[in-house]
Amino acid sequence: MVNIKSQSEIAKLRKAGQITGGALVAAGKAIRPGMTTKELDNLILKYFKSHGAKAGFLGYGGFPGAACISVNDVVIHGIPGGYVLKEGDIVSVDTGAYIDGVYGDSAKTFAVGEISDEAKALMKSTEDSLYLAISMVKPGVRLGDIGAAIQKHNEDNGFGVVREFVGHGVGHDLHEDPEVPNFGKPGHGLRLREGMVIAIEPMITAGDHAVKVLDDGWTTVTKDHSLAAHFEHTIAVTATGCMILSDPNS
Ligand code: MG
Ligand code: MG
């Protein structure tokens, strides 16, 4: 069942989203070669605490970090730990504040120092496809229209679109209906309505789109070990378009 959010719920979701976006800005400023992914996670946890929020991901389904920190061929759900970031890595940080009974959810892939042209192109394609999707959102647009646009943009650039994991509704639960795929057919799927709050989150690979989950039950890597990027915003559908809830500057 897809929940339609009230104005007061959307205001709370915006607060959670802005704290989430702020944590990603802080993470981006701190990322450098020599830092462990656990240090990065601790920085995000402290950011949430100092803004009166809890780390929505910590303990969610048993996840052991405040953020999913996914390096290079890790697509999503990387567990923060002792890995030391090095020049040339790309690192996807996916996190969410929990405050006033609702979640934020946003992700961004960052460069560690100087990165390859392939990594730059992958990150640009993934981020551009997120903003392309956001530009399409308004009442009446179908989820298949959005998924197809994300898929076409990235496949035209020669990249793979992950199928096994998708975007989702956001609210009092981190993952609500509907599913928001990054692939699809125009003219198919649920029609967006004013008051829906969804996370759009393209997960894109430099090689084949197939992924596998490692034995820890979380870490999701590309099967061919190609690089992966992940950009995500939580948005609210408005009467005429949408509002990005997880943009700290919105
Ligand atoms: Mg996320
Ligand atoms: Mg999400």
Image: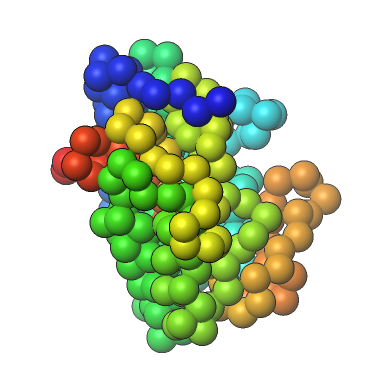
Q: Residue at x 28, y 45 (%)?
A: 138
Residue 97: quarter of image:
top left
As drawn, the residue found furthest toward the left would be: 249
The percent position of residue 3, horizontal first and vertical second, equals 46, 23
The colour scheme of the drawn protein is rainbow
70 horizontally vs 201: left or right:
right
Question: In terms of depth relative to the viewer, which is nearer, 46 or 209?
Answer: 209
Please state which of residues 105 and 6 is positioned toward the viewer in this rendering. 6
Quadrant including the C terminus: top left
The answer to whether 5 is drawn above or below residue 143 in the figure is above
Q: Quadrant of residue 70?
A: bottom right
Above or below for 66 versus 162: above
Q: Give the quadrant of the N terminus.
A: top right
Number of residue marks: 0
Task: Give the residue at the far front of this rendering.
Answer: 187
Q: Residue at x 33, y 67 (%)?
A: 128
Residue sitting at 56 percent across and 42 percent down? 179
Rendered location of residue 164, percent (x, y): 68, 55
